[in-house]
Amino acid sequence: MTSDRTPRRRRENDWRLFLRLVPYAKRNQKLLWVAFALLVPLSLAGSVQPILVGQTISFIRQEPTYFFLDGKTFSDGIAILVGLLFLTIALRAVLDSVQSFLVQVVGQRMTMQIRNDLFDRVTSLSSSFFDRTPVGRLITRLTSDVEALGDVFSTGAIGIVSDLATILVIVIVMFSVQWQLALLLVAMLIPVSAVVIYFQQQFRQANYRAREELSRLNSSLQENIVGISIVQLFRRERYNAEAFRSINQQYIEAVDRTIFHDSAVSATLEWISLVAIAGVLWLGGDRVMEGQMNFGLLASFILFAQRLFDPLRQFADKFTSLQSGFTAVERISDLLDEPIDIQDPERHETVSIALSTASVNASDISGEIRFENVWFGYKPDEYVIRDLNFTIRPGEKVALVGPTGAGKSSIIRLLCRLYEPQKGRILVDGIDIRNLRQSELRQHIGVILQDGFVFAGNVKSNITLGETYPFETIKAAAEQTNVSQFIEQLPQGYDTRLRERGTNLSGGQKQLLAFARVAIRDPKIMVLDEATANLDVKTEAWIQQALDRLLETRTAIVIAHRLSTIRNVDRILVLKRGQLVESGSHEELLDSNGLYASLYKLQLLGS
C-alpha cells in the first residue's frame, strides 16, 4: 500500500484557496446575496441593544436621555425602552434564523456539487493513479474533507463576514457615542488580531497533519476489511490490531495539537475581553466621577465591550472551521489538479471511421490489432514490455503465454487503454487508439477477467451496467452464453438482489455473469484473461461451448496458464520479460523445442 505521507506541492495561500470555491458559490449566488443582505439589519439590531440598555439606566437615574424620552412618565419611558429592546431581540432572532438556514443550504449544495465533481474526476483518472493511491485516502477526501469544505462557506466565510460587519457597525456606533472609550476598545483589537492570526496559522499546520493521519487510518481500516479473510486465515488479528492502534494513536496526537491551538485562541480572547471591560470601567468610571459621562453611557460601553469581543470570539471559532475547510480545499485541490493521463482526442481530431458507431455498423468492423514498437512500464525506466511488435489479424484467435511477469496482462491493459505506452503505438483497424474516444474503443472490446466484479443491485443491472437493453435482449445474451439456467435458479431470477461485491454468489456464479455482460454488448474483439479459472470442470465445458459460438466471427486474445486449454487457437504468442520470443501454433512451438515446449512439458510433469 502506498504511503499517504507523499510529498505535496507548495501550499497555496488562503486567498487562492478561497478563489477555488468561487465557481461553486456562483452557482448559488441568489441565496448568497440574500444572506449577505441580512447582515446590515442584523448588525444594526445588535448594536442598538447596548444603547437601549444604557438609556434605560439613565432614564431610571434621571440622567440626560434621548429626545424621544423627554417628558415621558416613568412607566411610559420604561415601556418604550423595553418594547424597543424586545423588538430588536425579535428582529435579530428572525433574521439570524433565516440567514443561518440560507447559509446551511448553500453549504450543503456546494458540498454536493464538489463531491459530484470529485467523483467525476476520480473516475476519469488512469489506472496508474490508483496504483499509487490508497483507497482509504480517496474515501477520506470524498467524505470528511468535503464535509469540512462545506463549512468554508456555510459557517466559515459568511459567518466571518457577518462577524466583521457586526464589529464594524459596533465600532461606528461607539465612536458616534463616546470616542475615548471607543478608541480604547478598538486599540485592544490589535493585539487580539495578532494572537488570533498566530494561533490560526499553527492550527492550520496541525489540522493538515491530522487529516493526513486520518487518511492513513482510513486506508488501514479499508485494507483490513477488504483482506479480512487473509487476516483471519493467517492469524494476523493481533499484529494488525497493534498496527492499527499505532496509527490511531498518531491520529489522536495530531488531533490533540489542533485542540490545543483552538483552545489557546479561546482562552486568550476570554482574557483580553476581561481586560477590555476592566479598561472601560477604569477610564469610564473616572469620567463618571468627574461628571463628564453619565452612568447609563458607561453601562452601554460595558455591553459594547462584550458585544465587540463576542463576534471576535465567534470569529475565532469560525476561523478554526475556515482553516479546517482550507485544509480540505488544499487536499481536494491536489485531487482535482491530478492530471488525467489518458484523455479523448479533441473533437476535430477524432477519427470517425472503423470504430465510430455513428458511421459504421458493428458488423463492418474487422477487429485487426497491431502493436508497433511498444514500450511500457508501470514506473519510469522500469519497462515490463520492451519493443513489442505483433499483429493479430481480423477474426484470429491468439493466445498469450509466458512466465509470471512476462507482460501478458499489461498487453490487455494497454489495448483497453487503461494505461498509455511510453513509446510506440497500438492500432485497431489501422487507427491509433489514442485517436479514438475511449467509450468507442471499449465498446468494441469485451474483456472477461479471472475475478468477475459484481455491483450491489440486481442481476439485470449487473449485466447491463447502466446501459438500456430490453429484457428480451438481456435474456438472449444469458441464453447465448449458457448462463440463463443459473440465473433462473436464483430466488427472483433476473430480479434477484445481489449484495456488495456479490457476496451472496459463488466465485463461479459471478464469473458466469461476466460472460453475459460481455455477450450483450456484441464486441468485435474478445479478451479472456483466465476467464474459466473459477469454474468447475462441468461448468467450464458448458461455458466453453458458448464461447466457441461467441468467438466464431470475432478477434480473440486468450490468456491462460493451463496450456492444454489453448491448443485450438490459431496462433500462440510466447512472451518473456516483455518481449515476444516465439510465435506459432501449438504443434509448431512444440517442434521448435523452445520456451513454450519447456513450459508445456513442465505442466505435463506437474499433472
Image (cartoon, rainbow, N blue to C red):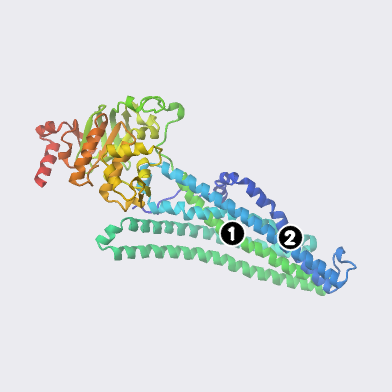
Count of marks placed on residues: 2
Residue topped by disc 2: 45
Residue 200 falls left or right of residue 534: right
Furthest residue toward right: 71
> Measured along the vertical axis of the image, is residue 172 above or below residue 301?
above
Tag nearer the camera, 2 or 1: 2
Residue 250 falls left or right of residue 563: right
Disc number placed over residue 306 in the picture, else none: none
Check if mark 2's residue and mark 1's residue have beta carbons within 8 Å: no
Picture residue at 72% right of the left edge, 60% below the top: 91
Residue 490 falls left or right of residue 38: left
Work out whether residue 9 or residue 452 is closer to the camera in this orientation and state it. Answer: 452
Work out whether residue 243 or residue 181 is closer to the camera in this orientation and state it. Answer: 243
Q: Position of residue 76 (x, y in %)?
A: 85, 69
Q: Is residue 440 visible?
A: yes
Q: Position of residue 416 (x, y in %)?
A: 33, 36
**Label 2: how many residues lie within 10 Å, few (<14), some (14-19) or many (20+)?**
many
* Quadrant assignment, res 394: top left
Picture residue at 28% right of the left edge, 29% below the top: 370
Q: Is residue 46 visible?
A: no
Work out whether residue 23 or residue 498 is closer to the camera in this orientation and state it. Answer: 498
> Measured along the vertical axis of the image, is residue 211 above or below residue 455?
below
Q: Residue flagged by tag 2: what amino acid is it? A: Ala
Q: Position of residue 5 (x, y in %)?
A: 40, 54
Give whichever of discs 2 and 1 has the lower sequence position.
Answer: 2
Query: In whole angstroms, how far apart are the C-alphas of marks 2 and 1?
Result: 21 Å
Query: Considering the numbered disc 2 on the image, is that residue within a helix, a strand or a loop?
Result: helix
Q: Residue flagged by tag 1: what amino acid is it? A: Lys
Q: Position of residue 505 (x, y in %)?
A: 29, 51
**Label 1: how many residues lie within 10 Å, few (<14), some (14-19) or many (20+)?**
many
Picture residue at 54% right of the left edge, 64% below the top: 262
Residue topped by disc 1: 318
